[in-house]
Image (tube, rainbow, N blue to C red):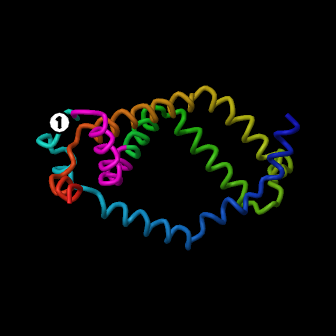
């Protein structure tokens, strides 16, 4: 337990909050904007006329390789949707994430100063320890590992099944033969 407390004391919260600067947010917003603009329309993504069973393993590999690149933004949207669904259906996990995030943010806003309450003075390390003592049992009950395993499994099944059965456009077949 003392190792955990020592580790918590050595964490530099400023390095974490510096990554949330306005410049980084603007840079990330540009990346997100470019990904959104490269989303394929649903009519193309769900076009069942282009679904077929691959004839052999080589064709399966070619389809998966091509479709993972071509529909990359759509697949990211699927993973984000499944993540949102997983959090909505596991409200305790959502609460724990909000509690830890809000707690770390509130403690870091103290700027290393002690928190003075009518019950006494609390240092930053004591506040982090209290947050850990409260959040750890709640996180254990919220089962984040099983939620992550479900998310990984459902994402892989949905993305790989779409990438496997969606035919490559006819134009790419002609480009490969030339």
- The verdict on residue 57 being magenta is yes
Residue at numbered disc 1: 52
Q: What residue appears at the point 64 percent right and 44 percent down from the top-left corner?
A: 100
- The verdict on residue 155 being magenta is no
Q: Secondary structure at mark 1?
A: loop
Where residue 50 appears, x then y in whole percent? 15, 43
Q: Residue furthest front?
A: 178
Where residue 62 appears, x then y in whole percent? 30, 45
Q: What residue appears at the point 45 percent right and 67 percent down from the top-left corner?
A: 29
Give the dominant element type of the magenta stretch: helix, strand or loop. Answer: helix
- Quarter of the picture holding the N terminus: top right
Where residue 172 appears, x then y in whole percent? 21, 56
Which residue range is magenta in the image?
Answer: 55-78
Residue 46, quarter of the rendered image: top left
Q: What residue appears at the point 27 percent right and 40 percent down from the top-left corner?
A: 59
* Relative side of 24 to 74, left or right: right
Relative to 58, say whether 74 is above or below: below
> Is 90 in front, or is 64?
64
- Quarter of the picture holding the C terminus: bottom left
Q: Residue furthest left?
A: 49
Relative to 24, say whether 156 is above or below: above
Residue 153, quarter of the rendered image: top left
């Amino acid at each position: 337990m003392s190792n955990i407390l020592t580790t918590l004391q050595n964490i530099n919260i400023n390095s974490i909050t510096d990554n949330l600067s306005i410049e980084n947010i603007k840079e990330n917003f540009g990346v997100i904007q470019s990904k959104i603009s490269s989303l394929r329309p649903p009519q193309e993504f769900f076009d069942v006329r282009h679904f077929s069973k691959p004839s052999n393993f080589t064709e399966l590999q070619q389809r998966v390789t091509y479709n993972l690149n071509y529909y990359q933004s759509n697949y990211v949207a699927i993973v984000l949707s499944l993540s949102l669904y997983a959090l909505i259906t596991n409200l305790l996990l959502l609460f724990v994430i909000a509690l830890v995030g809000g707690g770390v943010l509130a403690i870091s806003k103290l700027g290393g100063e002690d928190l003075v309450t009518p019950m006494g003075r609390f240092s930053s390390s004591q506040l982090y320890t209290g947050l850990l003592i409260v959040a750890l049992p709640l996180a254990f009950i919220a089962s984040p590992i099983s939620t992550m395993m479900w998310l990984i499994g459902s994402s892989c099944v949905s993305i790989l099944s779409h990438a496997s059965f969606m035919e490559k456009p006819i134009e790419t077949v002609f480009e490969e033969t030339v």
